[in-house]
Amino acid sequence: MFYLVLICFIVLVVVGPSYWVKHTMKKYSEPADRYSFTGAQLARDLLNQANLRHIGVEETESGDHYDPLEKMVRLTPDKFNGRSLTAITVAAHEVGHAIQDRDNYPPLAFRTRLVQWAAPAEKLGAGILMLAPVIMTVLRSPTAGLLFLVGGILTLGSAAVVHALTLPMELNASFARALPILERERYLIDGDLPHARRLLSAAAWTYVAASLMTLLNMARWLAILRR
C-alpha cells in the first residue's frame, strides 16, 4: 500500500505541473477573438516601446521562445495570429526575455550557454540511442544496456538540467518584465489581470514541467534496462 501511494505521489508531482500548464493555456485560449490585436502585434509594439526595434517577431512550429542569438521572438501560430488572452500574455512573456537580453540579465546569458552545451550532448545521446539496439543484436552483451543508459542521460538528462535551472529567469520574465508593462500600459481588458497572472505563471513553469516529464522518460529507460 505504501509503495502504491508513493508511486501515485511521484506521478502527481511529475505529471501534475505539465497538466496544469496545458490546462491553463487552453482555458484562456477562448474566446479566440477577445482582443483587437494579435500576439504578434503586441510583441512588436512592446519591443518598439523597449527600444528593441532590431528584434524580430516571427511564426514558428517549435514552441514559443525568444532566441537571444538570432534576436528573434518566435511564437507558435495560435499565439502569433491569436487574439486570446493566452496569445497576448505568452507574447508579453517572450518579450520579457528580450528585455532581459537588452538589460544583460546574467541568468539569461547563463541559460544561453547551457543550451549551447546541451545541444551537442542531446545529439550525441540520440546517436547512441539509435546505435544501441544494433549493438545489442550483434554483441548480445550488457554493453548495449550501458549505451542505452548513457544515451538516455545525455539526451534527456541534459534537457532536464537546462529546464530546471531556468525557472528563476522565467519567473523574472513573467513578473518583473512582462506583467509591469501590461499593467502600466493597460493592455488588458478589465478583469483579465488575475487570469493573466495565472498564465504568466504557467508560461514560466512550462520548461520545468517539460523537465519533469523528461525525468519520467528517463525512469522509463531505466525500467527497460532492468528487464
Image: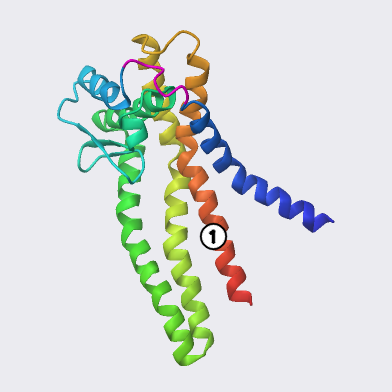
Q: Is residue 32 magenta?
A: yes
Where is residue 186 drawn, in percent x and y? 37, 9
* 223 w.r.t. 177: above or below: below
* First to last magenta residue range: 30-36
Question: Can you identify the residue that label 1 sits on?
Answer: 217
Residue at 35% over, 51% down = 114
Where is residue 40 drawn, in percent x and y? 28, 27
State the residue lying farthest toward the left.
Answer: 54
How many discs appear?
A: 1
Q: Please name whichever residue, 47 or 36, is drawn nearer the observer in this view of the structure.
A: 36
Quadrant (top left/top right/bottom left/bottom right) for the C terminus: bottom right
Residue at 33% over, 46% down = 62
Q: Main secondary structure of the magenta part?
A: loop
* 175 w.r.t. 73: above or below: above
Residue at 31% over, 18% down = 37
Quadrant (top left/top right/bottom left/bottom right) for the N terminus: bottom right
* 25 w.r.t. 147: above or below: above
Res 132 → quadrant: bottom left
Q: Is residue 181 left or right of residue 141?
A: left
Q: Could you tell me which secondary element the residue under label 1 belongs to?
A: helix
Where is residue 15 drawn, in percent x and y? 60, 47
Where is residue 18 drawn, in percent x and y? 55, 43
Q: Is residue 63 magenta?
A: no
* 210 w.r.t. 84: above or below: below
Residue at 36% over, 72% down = 127
Residue kind at label 1, given as amino acid type: Asn
Q: Is residue 195 left or right of residue 11?
A: left
